[in-house]
Amino acid sequence: MTKWFSQTALLGIVLGVVYLVFLHPYLDMTLTSAHDPASYLLRAESFWSTYRYGELFADGFFPVTSQMPGLTLLLIPLVGIFGVNFVVLKLFMVLLAGGMAVAAGIFFRRFLEPEQKPEWATLVLMASPVVFMLAHRILAEIPLVLFVMLALVWMDRYLREEGPVVSRTLFGAVIFITAAYLMKITALGLMAGGWFLLVHKRYRTPAVFRKLLACSLMVAVPVLLWEWWCSTVPMRGYWAKPPILLFVDKDPMAVHYTGMISAGEFLVKVRHNLLWGMLGSVGTVFNPPLFFVYSEMKGVVLSIPFVLWLAFMWIRSFRRQPSVLEGFVLFGLMLLSVATAGYAHRYMMPLFPAFIVYGFRSLEGAWRLWVPRAVFALGFAASVVVGIQQWVNPYGTPEVRDYLAIAREANSRYGKGTVGITPLPAHWQVLTDHRSFAGDTAGFDAIRRGDRSVRYAVGFPEGKNLGLSDPRKMENVTGDLLKRTLKITRWIWLNGGKLKLVARNGTFGLYEVVP
């Protein structure tokens, strides 16, 4: 045991060094990899100045209920003290990943026997390229998984121990469940998973029922408070959502909650999320190179053996040694199929520790020695490749690179607090000292009124090929960036006398408002 522990400890140190080596100051990439990072930072900035939870733009304050406030609450002190300092922020996320590694050690020692190599399970989880990538992003998944693992450990202790209903273990479970819920609403699967244990005769006792009831009532307080607050916020575009998860956009894959879908659309959404999300992500846990398979169909086909294997182990574990883990996996998948807005490996990450538990429980004999080593080696290599890719191509696309360059140009030309009309206004406000409009129309109306606070707009320069013919550029951040820039550009060209081009790069132009 000492030999293996010393070896795994050394590998853990090496892995930690790799995490820090790739802690490079390409913060721009941290923002532009998704919409969420900029939104989290803008909410932290807005809270520091207004003491309200939402996003402050030039055209007003927008309360936000479309995302849980957990990560924003963690970022508020950092943003308030250091400002939007990307080195500090990224170091904080890597430190959270270190906390996740500690929580993983506690988690795997709880749900795996010593001979099942729980220390290797921790290494396999932390070497996953999905975990490595998210540890260098300002996203909620790392703290979510940290709190989920601790919540499962404390719930399992609470339900198994003999003692009073109200105990320190109960308060620990409630704290970690609430913390996980504040990161992502899918963490409600933790509580539902506990109730699922009553299906098994071993747990069908009055004592377990009373404990589940006490835990549920305590967890219900913050849940109902948040949902009540959501119900009091007026619906304003994509910033707000109704408390009921089924109220989603007409587009089953959309990220904005603005309308109610039909039963048929709901089934399409569930099928898409389970098929592409679950099947496409499970394989990356045990075969990390699948992370680089960008074809959804290929990822699903290559992951099917792992899914069948884990399904068998789930059934065997529930029959032989049932725990809160089985219920969490079941209801976690249900919630992910309803509450997520499309396919991404990070949505499935809260279930990765449970998948690893089932995988390690199935290993016997020499397999226990070599399979963890092989999976760790593959994951480590894949994570290094991800890090190198970030160094080589930090911006992803030329459009994102040029957008960041034009933001720096505007920041150097105009003073703090200057107002402009820009694409991706949350990103712009985080990258600069300026204000932007959440809605383009409000900015256009301000210029028409002769509002002198609006100094510039960002659009395509004249003669620029708008670059919208490539459908791959119409997805995610780059697509939204180009589509919104096109809208602004059309208005600029229709009102040519009101703005003049003062700076440009390969993709974008900076237009100054003519006094």
Image (spheres, helix red, strand yellow):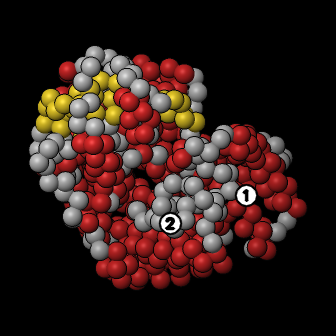
Element class at badge 2: loop
In the visual, does 111 lie left or right of 192?
A: left
Q: Type of residue at label 2?
A: Asp
| Mark carried by residue 160 | 1
* Callout 2 crowding tier (Cα within 10 Å): few <14, some 14–19, many ≥20: some
| Residue 292 placement (x, y as % from top left) | 25, 67
What label sits on residue 251 in the rendered view?
A: 2
Q: Is residue 477 visible?
A: no
Position of the C terminus by quadrant? top left
User: At 63% across and 72% down in the image, what residue appears?
Assistant: 262
Ranked by sequence position, the earlier of labels 2 and 1 is: 1
Q: Nearer the viewer, residue 418 or 179?
A: 418
- The residue tagged with tag 1: helix, strand or loop? helix
Q: Give the percent coordinates (x, y) of residue 248.
A: 58, 60
For image coordinates 46% across by 50% down, the residue present is: 141
Depicted 19 relative to depicted 88: above or below? below
Quadrant where the N terminus sits is bottom left
Callout 1 environment at 10 Å: few (<14), some (14 to 19), or many (20+)?
A: few
